[in-house]
Image (cartoon, rainbow, N blue to C red):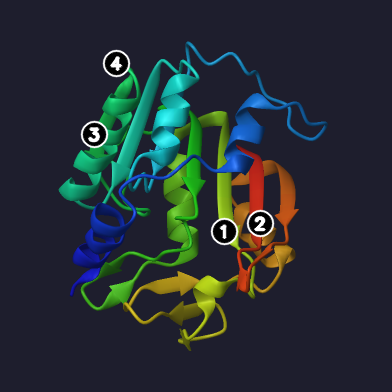
Amino acid sequence: MNYNETWNEIFCHKLKKSYPAEQLIRIFMGSYPKIKFDKIYYDKKVLDIGCANGRNTEFLASLGFKEVIAIDITEELINLARLNVESAGNYNNCKYMLGTNDCIPLDSNYLDFAVSWGVSYYMTLKDNRFSKYGENLKELARVLKKDGVLIIDVPQYNANVYDNTEAIDEFYFKDKNGFILRRFQNEEDFTRELSKYFYDIQLSTLTLDCFGKNYSRYTIVCRRI
């Protein structure tokens, strides 16, 4: 099973439908002292990179964004996201595209917001090499406008996604499906990478043992330099 087929198996067959991330709902709809951005979205454009089954895409569409761009790596995933969004409401503000973390098919300075929820730490595999995490961040920065907002979420070091992975070097690990994952040593490691392209970095730390599985996360809201 290759890289794309694995994702199709996970989402198109096992996780066809799921709900938006609670932390994402809080960021866009809640009021928190460290999050300061305009929460009127009708004239804004937002990206959902790694949309998978569209669970966050539909939520973003419901907020009234002028344009919601959902991107993933296979047509099957894109079609699943479209089906789930369209079955949830009469949204005409969504677009669907093929793309990867390090190659987003949008013009530079196009977006007001970008959401990378549990996605950015997956490296793109091409010609027996894999992208480095900085390439993914650089691409997200490219498509955002100056001062545009990035919402980005990754697992903490001991999260279960890294169970039974093989270390390639200090920062990159290979899982059983052959995916290459960036593994963050701590929150300083994560924020240091982001600070090359983003500022006003606000960190949320979620420690969660869910019935024996560690789902602990780092979530950051920041702005493009």
For mark 3, give the secondary structure: helix
Q: Residue at x 64, y 25 (%)?
A: 29
The Cα–Cα distance between marks 2 and 1, rounded to whole angstroms, is 5 Å
In the picture, which quadrant includes the N terminus? Answer: bottom left
| Upstream in sequence: badge 1 or badge 4 | 4
Residue 138 or residue 48, whichever sits in front: 48
Q: Is residue 109 visible?
A: no
Label of residue 97 in the image: none
Label of residue 218 in the image: 2
Q: Position of residue 163 (x, y in %)?
A: 52, 81
Amino acid on which the number 1 mark rests in the picture: Val
For mark 4, give the secondary structure: loop
Q: Which residue is mark 1?
A: 154
In the picture, which quadrant includes the C terminus? Answer: top right
Amino acid on which the number 4 mark rests in the picture: Asn
Which-is-in-front pick, marks 1 and 4? 4
Residue contact between numbered discs 2 and 1, judged by CB atoms under 8 Å: yes
| Upstream in sequence: badge 3 or badge 4 | 3
Q: Is residue 175 visible?
A: yes
Which-is-in-front pick, marks 3 and 4? 3
| Upstream in sequence: badge 4 or badge 2 | 4
The Cα–Cα distance between marks 4 and 2, rounded to whole angstroms, is 32 Å
Residue 213 or residue 67, whichever sits in front: 213
Seen from this angle, which residue lies furthest front? 211
Label of residue 83 in the image: 3
Which-is-in-front pick, marks 3 and 1? 3
Q: Residues within 10 Å of mark 4 (few under 14, many from 20)?
A: few
Q: Which residue is mark 4?
A: 92
| Upstream in sequence: badge 3 or badge 2 | 3
